[in-house]
Amino acid sequence: MSAFRAVVLEHFRHPRNRGSLVDPSGQAEGANPLCGDRIRVQIRNENDAIAEARFTADACALCIASASLLTEHVRGMRTSDAMAVDAAWLHESLGGEPPAGRRKCAVLPLDTLRRALADAAMAT
Amino acid sequence: MAHGLIDHDDPLLRDETGVALATLVSATGSTAKKLGAKMLVGRSGRLIGGVTIGGCVDAQVIEAADALIDRGERRLLSISLDDDEAWEMGLTCGGAVDVLLERITPANAADPITAAHRVVHAALDRGASAVIVTPIDGAAAALVVDETGVRYGTLGNSALDAAAATIVPDVAASGARVESLEASGVSQRFFFDRFAPPTTLVIIGAGQIAMSLTRLARELEMRTMVIDGRERYATRERFPDADDIRVGMPSEIVASLTPNKRVAVVLVAHDYKYELPVLRQLVREPVGYLGMLGSKKRGVAVRALLREEGFTDDDLARIHTPIGLDLGGKSPPEVALSILAEVVAIRSGKRV
């Protein structure tokens, strides 16, 4: 099994940070209109840093793995640093670049996370 | 006459000064219709609406209608279904039925039967079941008791109303029937007629099978809700017959529903991204039916994943997959038919 596949399956079966926050500092929803992936990312800021990031999703394994990895990674980061997380980091963390037709699935949580961060920044 | 209730907005009915309402109140032997089956007949035997009781019963109701409308009487029509020649050939099931005939005036809000049907319409719209109690003999009267125990109308005295109300929960659970009630030392027979809200068919995945499901479910008087995460699929243009169309995260939408035995959920997205979250949400809820489109192999894989998450074999046994009765058809309308056949069978208490 390739490293990419192993990472995706592991995070799909045991997603980190799946669930909702009661009182998020910011949140955003994202969807892939053709395949039907839907995700909501919520973050809670504390002392200028991300104290918690969680997600809910009805989405494919790759999208869920991506959300799981991202929400783990940004915990404790400042907003500006979290905003700088990019697709290259994501691909490396996934153990490889997703097939061309699946890149949108991996990037949807990243895009949604950024909008959740922007939402939190607007609220402060 | 949806759900056995008078449709007060029916233009055919609105202009009638009086119509005969026939209700099947008891039956022995084998009949095609359930107790509570109804038909409405106007003057000169004009059938109002598409509902009839069936066979020779219809003919006798039509024959009796004019006199009944003129005189405003109520009567019990006892009809033997035996036909000696047909019986010899095995062409009749035999038995007897009692049909309660009564005149109603739909335009008159004070008509007790008309008023009772309005109250039941309102209860069904709220998602509540209700029972109408009417006397078999004597003057027209109607008492409605909804599933919360709230009463409307009267049978003529409070002792009868109270006695009837004690029987209603059992009727609500087991079905329509005749019961005798006693008040002031006099015994009288009453028909307890049960009305339940329609089955709500919740369809996850707005594809071609879903389109067929909404069309066929309408014929079966089911409410339909179509859910998908894709806006361009779950549209009114594609689902003109659906009662409700929702776009969003399917697992969150189903979580907002009130699960009960009148809710049937069918997963026809053929996509685990919806199936797993929706099944996690519903597999322990008391929905009447939970089915998932897919092969036996997929069913095994989905169950295995959910078992890893802590769902028990009893939980997972509630998922009907492969979905539907095996009718042999493969086209979307045929698959939809097999799904609805299974929903109806389960709703009727059949083991499938």
Image (cartoon, coloured by chain):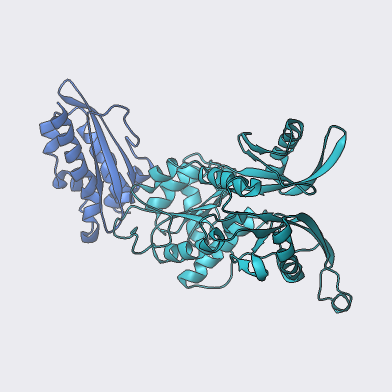
Chain colours: A blue, B cyan
Q: Nearer the viewer, residue A3 or A50?
A: A50
Residue B105 in which image quadrant: bottom right
Judge whether A110 appears above or below A52 on screen. below
For the point 29% across and 57% down, which residue is it? A35
Q: Position of residue A26 (x, y in %)?
A: 21, 32
User: With respect to residue B331, does B310 lie above or below?
Assistant: above
Q: Quadrant of the N terminus of chain A?
A: bottom left
| Residue A89 in picture, x, y percent from top left | 16, 43
User: Considering the image in quadrants, where does the C terminus of chain A appear?
Assistant: top left
User: Going 47% across and 47% down the picture, which residue do you hit?
Assistant: B279
Q: Nearer the viewer, residue B184 or B32?
A: B184
Residue at the farthest top position:
A47
Q: How many numbered marks have been drawn onto this rendered protein structure?
A: 0
**Is residue B138 shown left or right of residue B1?**
right
Residue A5 shows in the view: yes
The residue at the point 74 percent across, 69 percent down is B63
B340 vs A80, nearest the viewer: B340
Closer to the camera, B118 or B53? B118
Residue at image x 53%, y 44%? Answer: B122
Question: Quick check: can you spot residue B261?
Answer: no
Instruction: Find residue A16 and report its horizontal and vertical position in percent.
Output: 32, 36
Q: Position of residue A71 (x, y in %)?
A: 25, 36
Q: Quadrant of residue A66?
A: top left
Q: Is residue A74 above or below residue B288?
A: above
